[in-house]
Image: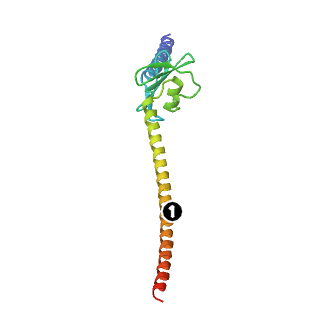
């Protein structure tokens, strides 16, 4: 009887040890998931941006793309909750708008996202660019007009030169005739 009790005790201790190991494994797995959810990852994005991704304990995934030097948009945040995706864009002034787009906002250019959000470009940049274009046009017209004036001046100088030569020949011829009359 004592051998049977001893074997029975060993089996019970083994079962107890196995149960504790499974519980420890389940706790370790839950702790690993909680740690993964709490630590965001950051990667370099296109168009001089940075993308930070995190998942909270309830499974909500948040991806934030921050632009370093875009004058029209500062960040885009994509939140995915229960399969529902929401995209919000933030301007440099802090204005936030919901964006409806089929583009991958984590890959699109900042200008494309700013246009989709309805953030307007700075009009001063347009005016400066237009003034530069007008100055370039004026320079081209000035160069063209200067070339025409130069060509006309050369043509006029040639005409005057030709007439001067003809006049000199005529004067020389007349002088020669006059000299022959005076000196036979």
Indicate how the structure is coloured in the image: rainbow
Instruction: Single out the residue that lies furthest toward the right.
Output: 102
Mark 1 crowd level (few <14, some 14–19, many ≥20, 10 Å Cα) = few
Residue under the point 49% across and 76% down: 169
Image location of residue 12, percent across then percent down? 49, 13
Image location of residue 163, percent across then percent down? 50, 68
Q: Is residue 39 left or right of residue 148?
A: left
Above or below, comparing residue 117 to residue 107 in the picture: above
Q: Which residue is mark 1?
A: 155
Element marked by disc 1: helix
Q: Pick the residue in front: 163 or 62.
A: 163
**Is residue 152 among what the camera can see?**
yes
Count of numbered circles on the image: 1
Image location of residue 70, percent across then percent down? 43, 31
Residue under the point 50% across and 27% down: 114
Residue under the point 49% across and 31% down: 110
Image location of residue 145, percent across then percent down? 49, 51
Q: Pick the residue in front: 29 or 176.
A: 176
């Amino acid at each position: 009887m004592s051998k049977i009790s001893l074997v029975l005790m060993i089996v019970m201790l083994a079962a107890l040890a196995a149960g504790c190991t499974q519980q420890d494994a389940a706790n370790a797995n839950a702790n690993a998931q909680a740690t993964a959810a709490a630590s965001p990852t950051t990667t370099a994005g296109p168009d001089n941006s940075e993308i930070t991704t995190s998942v909270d304990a309830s499974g909500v995934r948040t991806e934030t793309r921050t632009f370093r030097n875009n004058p029209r948009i500062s960040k885009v945040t994509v939140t995915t909750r229960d399969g529902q995706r929401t995209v919000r864009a933030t301007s440099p002034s802090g204005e936030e708008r919901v964006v409806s787009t089929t583009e991958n906002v984590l890959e699109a250019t900042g200008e494309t996202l700013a246009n989709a959000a309805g953030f307007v470009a700075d009009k001063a940049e347009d005016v400066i660019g237009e003034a530069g274009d007008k100055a370039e046009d004026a320079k081209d017209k000035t160069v063209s007009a200067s070339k025409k004036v130069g060509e006309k001046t050369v043509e006029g100088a040639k005409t005057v030169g030709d007439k001067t030569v003809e006049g000199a020949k005529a004067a020389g011829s007349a002088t020669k005739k006059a000299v022959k009359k005076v000196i036979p």
